[in-house]
Image (cartoon, rainbow, N blue to C red):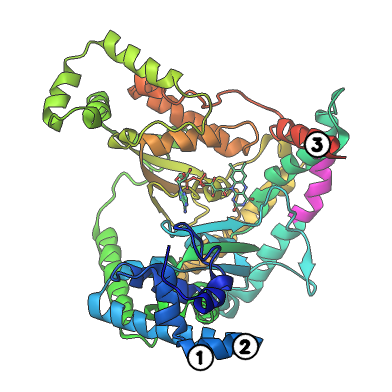
Amino acid sequence: MNDLTLAEKEMLAPFVTNTEGPVFVLTNLPEVVKGALFSRYSRSSLGLRELLVKEFLGASEAELGDMLANASAGDLARKMFQAVSKAQSFYDRILDGYGDDSIGELGGAHLALEGVSMLATKAVEDARIGGSPLEKSTRYVSFADKANGEYRFYQEPRLMAAHGDLYLNTCRSLFEGYKDMIPQLTLHLQQRMPREEGVSEAAWLRSVKARALDGLRGLLPAATLTNMGVFGNGRFFETLLIRLGVSHLTELNHLARDAGRELNKVIPSLIRRADPGHRHFEGFQRFYTHYHAAVKDTATTALFPDREASSLPEGGVNLVDWDRDAETRLLASLVYPETDLPLDRLRAWAEGLTDEDKTALFKTLTDTRENRRHKLGRELEMVEYTFDLLGDFGMYRDMHRHRTLTQSRQRLTTRHGYVLPPEVVEAGLEERFRGLMAQAAHAWEVLSVEFPEEAQYVVPMAFRVRWLWKVNLRALCWLLELRSQPQGHPAYREMAQKMFRRIEQVHPRLASLLRFVDLHDYPLGRLGAEQRLEEKRQEKK
Ligand SMILES: Cc1cc2nc3c(=O)[nH]c(=O)nc-3n(C[C@H](O)[C@H](O)[C@H](O)COP(=O)(O)OP(=O)(O)OC[C@H]3O[C@@H](n4cnc5c(N)ncnc54)[C@H](O)[C@@H]3O)c2cc1C
């Protein structure tokens, strides 16, 4: 129910899914208007539709009658322009007046970034809250094609100016090797894993191709150009643009400039502080510069005498911290909302439970889960783990995509060695693969002396990188169950399984909650999923 006139309702109709009921969705309105409208809503006695008519579309009864009688696309555009201007001044008032940054979350945009390096996608995907990225897959799409006679890799300007031949030759050789080896490895895999009876040929061919591309993605340098889409809210984009804008890497500065220009056409008010001319941007720039310099100084002056000895976590997975009283924390928090007692009292209760009691309690919880999407309660977030991880950059790219945890990675280097996929050896491609890795390692050694940040572009994805995760049990449950599924890449499946084994060692009862971690080995992991897809396709025909 609302007290809008018939004329007002008619004008509203294109902008709401219904003009009467208490539940409706906004449609056909610019993002900034929707955002401002929602924000205004919190301080008004009016309903959203009344606000839209009276404060944003700003139409008087006379104007409305005129508009409806002579409605044209031009009128609508004029109204929209008026609404956007009002929204803009509203944001200026609210952001400057009240400093309520969260109103930037009330509008969003779909941003496409094409021809960006894999290194740059990581910088974008590192932003966690309020954004949803999706990137071209190295498993289903080959990166061997050229554009204008050149392989698709980022030609980093500082490296090109100082060591152009070395950089170009290294990247070109890697792509050449990648392109040549795809048909060779595919043929080998077809022979080694022939199609079994009852398996569709199309599904088998697709899974073999995916396996070949999985095996060879390690040859692609971090400079490889790819495409990505990001859906995010204004606050997400504003923070992202600032971070990219103050980065040391030229590509990220250019991305910030280009993305800022395009986003300004859709959500200008929501990202205005990311404009390099804005006083806030200058402040952020100073802050980030000083902050990073301080951290760098600390790292440079610290002494690490056992640097070599401690360079590899065992098997790539080192569980560094875990809660010694994890079960007590979890059990006390679980019952907390069902009682009226304070937490310390409930912890005392949990500490008094016998091992048998605890085993039985955890088993009851585990048994309620029918599949991995049945997530246990947020009380599992009371238990935390810190991992120090070492894995190839290709795998890191996948694992990095999880957002409900704290992550930090070191710079790409060739010093931790590389992972040679067994199928590459079996297919007789080892020598060429190793030769290319040696060429890339040499290039990195030369480039990194003067350009440690930029030299990352030349590092192929087979080389290992070190990163850390601080993650709670609930996020870990989702992550390990997802990343151990048969259709996953063998490299991250193995890491997920190793992480699970470590949890099992320190918290066997808690590990039992993660009942859908898949510990099996699958030679052609995509086959099951491809076969199911194929059967569905056939059913639809
Ligand atoms: C088989 C497979 C194929 C894939 N293929 C591709 C690909 O081709 N290209 C590509 O770019 N990525 C691909 N991915 C990665 C995928 O898109 C996700 O980035 C990744 O799985 C991590 O996201 P998540 O939502 O699963 O979990 P997390 O980011 O760990 O989030 C944990 C949980 O938090 C919640 N959550 C987190 N953020 C949000 C949000 N913004 N909105 C709502 N809920 C949220 C969800 O409940 C989610 O389950 C693939 C993943 C798999 C498993």
Q: Is residue 239 visible?
A: no
Mark nearer the viewer, 3 or 2:
2
Depth check: 44 or 139 in front? 44
> Which residue matches tag 1?
63
Q: Position of residue 143 (x, y in %)?
A: 73, 58
Amino acid carrying label 3: it is Glu
* Residue 453 rendering spot, x and y as whole percentages: 46, 66
In what element is the residue under mark 1? helix
Q: Residue at x 67, y 51 (%)?
A: 138
Mark 3 CB near ligand 1 (8 Å cut): no
Q: Which disc, if any, is residue 498?
A: none
Task: Provide the residue span drawn in magenta.
Answer: 177-189
Within-10-Å neighbours for mark 3: few <14, some 14–19, many 20+: some
Mark 3–mark 2 distance (CA, rounded to whole Å): 55 Å
Q: Earlier in the sequence, mark 3 or mark 2?
A: 2
**Which quadrant of the figure has residue 71?**
bottom right
Q: Residue at x 49, y 34 (%)?
A: 480
The three-letter amino acid code for the residue at tag 1 is: Glu
Q: Main secondary structure of the magenta part?
A: helix
Q: CA distance from mark 1 to mark 3?
A: 58 Å
Question: Does 381 sit left or right of 217 as displayed?
Answer: left
Q: Which mark is residue 69?
A: 2
